[in-house]
Image: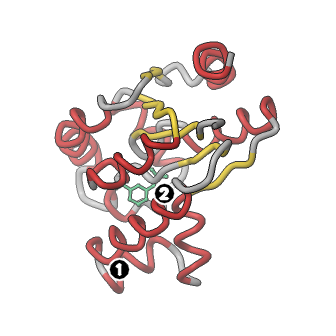
Amino acid sequence: MKKNIVLIGFMGSGKSTLAQILAQKTFRKVVSTDDLIQKQEGRSIADIFQKSGESVFRVLEHHVVLQVAQDQELIIDCGGGVVLNPQNMTALKKTGVLIYLSCQPKEILRRIQMQPKRPLLDVADPLAKIEELLHQRKSLYDQADLTIDTTDGDLQKAAQEIITKVLS
Ligand code: S3P
């Protein structure tokens, strides 16, 4: 069985960009849990959070995770909060290698400010929120098989590391 490459990590850690780089290098298909949720729901993540709330979003996310985890040989770009549900982690681990992209909070903030649309960080003090959520999630992200720090932004290097350590 050819295992999925599952990218987990906080918003702004580089999952989506790295997924595209890996797809080019490996000819694998990329699926994004956020994209699938938006397609299946016919509305944006921000709209789901705003009108239905985070708990509804998490249920939709769980269903999508179970769908994608049934497949193989994919690159799975996970929303940052996928790790919150232990059942998501079990399903993803069964068919995939989990890679945690870690990143320093200040760098996350810088990237998020260039690319808003993250309802959880739409608060008065986003840096404090990033630090709080990272603290809450650290032990969950640490369940990954491999951790790569992306603070320096060198995602080509990160892709090469994954190919060397996971695929060869
Ligand atoms: C979330 C991360 C987002 C998206 C939603 C919630 C989170 O995905 O799923 O806004 O809880 O960390 P990205 O990590 O792709 O930004």
Residue 112 in the image: above or below residue 43: above
Residue 62 in the image: above or below residue 95: below
Assess disc 1: are there few (<14), some (14-19) or many (≥20) residues with their C-alpha within 10 Å of its C-alpha: few
Indicate which disc residue 116 carries: 2
Image spot of residue 54 (x, y percent): 29, 71
Question: 68 and 1: which one is in front?
Answer: 1
Question: 97 and 36: which one is in front?
Answer: 97
Q: Is residue 116 left or right of residue 130?
A: right
Where residue 2 sits, quadrant-wise, is top right
Q: Colour scheme in the image?
A: secondary structure
Where residue 166 sits, quadrant-wise, is top right
Image spot of residue 145 (x, y percent): 41, 25
- The residue drawn where x is 63% and y is 47% is 72
- The residue drawn where x is 24% and y is 57% is 124
Q: Looking at the figure, which quarter contains the C terminus?
A: top right
Q: Amino acid at mark 2?
A: Pro
Residue indicated by mark 1:
50
Q: Amino acid at mark 1?
A: Gln
Image spot of residue 16 (x, y percent): 60, 45
- The residue drawn where x is 59% and y is 37% is 3
Image quadrant, ligand 1? bottom left
Asked if the beta carbon under badge 1 is closer than 8 A to the nearest atom of ligand 1, the reply is: no
